[in-house]
Amino acid sequence: MIIIPAIDLKDGACVRLRQGLMEDSTVFSDDPAAMAKQWVDQGAKRLHLVDLNGAFAGEPVNGDVVTEIAKAYPDLPIQIGGGIRDLATIEYYLNAGVNYVIIGTKAVKEPSFVKEACDAFAGHIIVGLDAKDGFVATDGWAEVSQVKATDLAKQFAGDGVSEIVYTDIARDGMMQGVNIEATVEMARAGGIPVVASGGITNMDDIKGLMAVAHEGISGAITGRAIYEGTLSVEEAQAYCDAFSA
């Protein structure tokens, strides 16, 4: 299992939101590239970038910052989400040096697009499923659908999706612990490797996820915890590596 530091981009700065609310954001750095370096220096094996403005706009807004980070670390896998709604945007990011693009809102509203994207860009597509009480939310979490996250995961089982990033919105940015039960349920439902997201606070969460990693948990995205110092990227990744050895 890999530890994936999150860099959420809003108006060119690195921020963290609470429960996805744009009006409840904390700015951690006005230099996202320098922040990326900090996590790389601590041994991060992948970075998770989110274009928060893009998630609401439905198109890339912080693309220049994403490109800058990708160019600075050509050998480091980077995944990007937020506002990816067409093949041209996927191509734009892959050309910029990003390894994986995360399809969220579009995957919920138009599931057939996922297979289309997987066919066009095999091995580079991740689906982002963000759920509130088990139901998928879209459009920067502004809308909650009537679709169960696990049901949607089953739909993508044969499409060629590399991973599913599963976020429990109620826990995101709240430092209340990861929802391990729901994450395992997601992995079992789709048979696709799942990256846990939302609520990861300290080593107890990492140990809890590692204990069920064999169920198909491939990674853990962490944001506020590493910025506020309740979790060390270096220590967490070392634990996962030792556990897997």
Image (spheres, helix red, strand yellow):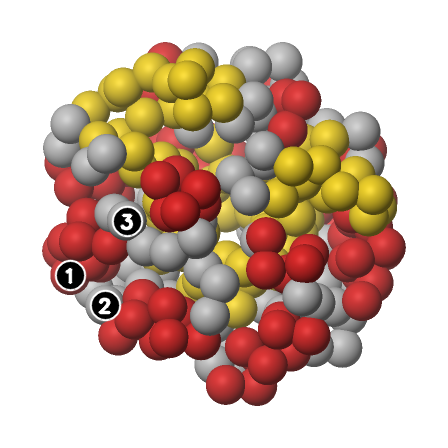
Q: Is mark 3 in CB contact (under 8 Å) with mark 2?
A: no
Q: Residue at x 77, y 70 (%)?
A: 157
Q: Is mark 2 in CB contact (under 8 Å) with mark 1?
A: yes
> Which amino acid is tagged 1?
Lys
Of the pair 224 and 45, the residue shown nearer to us? 224
Q: Which residue is drawn at 52% across and 27% down?
A: 20
Mark with earlier residue (1, 3): 3
From the top left corner, tell me how far across and down residue 17 is, in percent. Answer: 44, 22
Q: What element carries label 3?
A: loop
Mark 2 or mark 1: which is in front?
A: 2
* Disc 3 from disc 2: Cα separation: 14 Å
Query: Crowdedness of circle 3 by 10 Å Cα count: few (<14), some, many (20+)?
Result: many
Q: Is mark 1 in CB contact (under 8 Å) with mark 3?
A: no
Q: Is mark 1 on a helix, strand or loop?
A: helix
Mark with earlier residue (2, 1): 1
Query: Would residue 105 be found to the left or right of residue 36 on screen?
Result: right
Residue 87 position by quadrant: bottom left
> Which amino acid is tagged 2?
Ala
Residue marked by disc 3: 61
* Disc 2 from disc 1: Cα separation: 7 Å
Q: What element carries label 2?
A: loop
Residue marked by disc 1: 71
Residue 164 position by quadrant: bottom right
> Which amino acid is tagged 3?
Val
Q: In this view, does 11 lie above or below 71?
A: above
Query: Crowdedness of circle 2 by 10 Å Cα count: few (<14), some, many (20+)?
Result: some
Is residue 56 visible to the viewer in this orientation of the structure? yes
Of the pair 220 and 190, the residue shown nearer to us? 190
Mark 1 or mark 3: which is in front?
A: 3
Residue marked by disc 2: 96
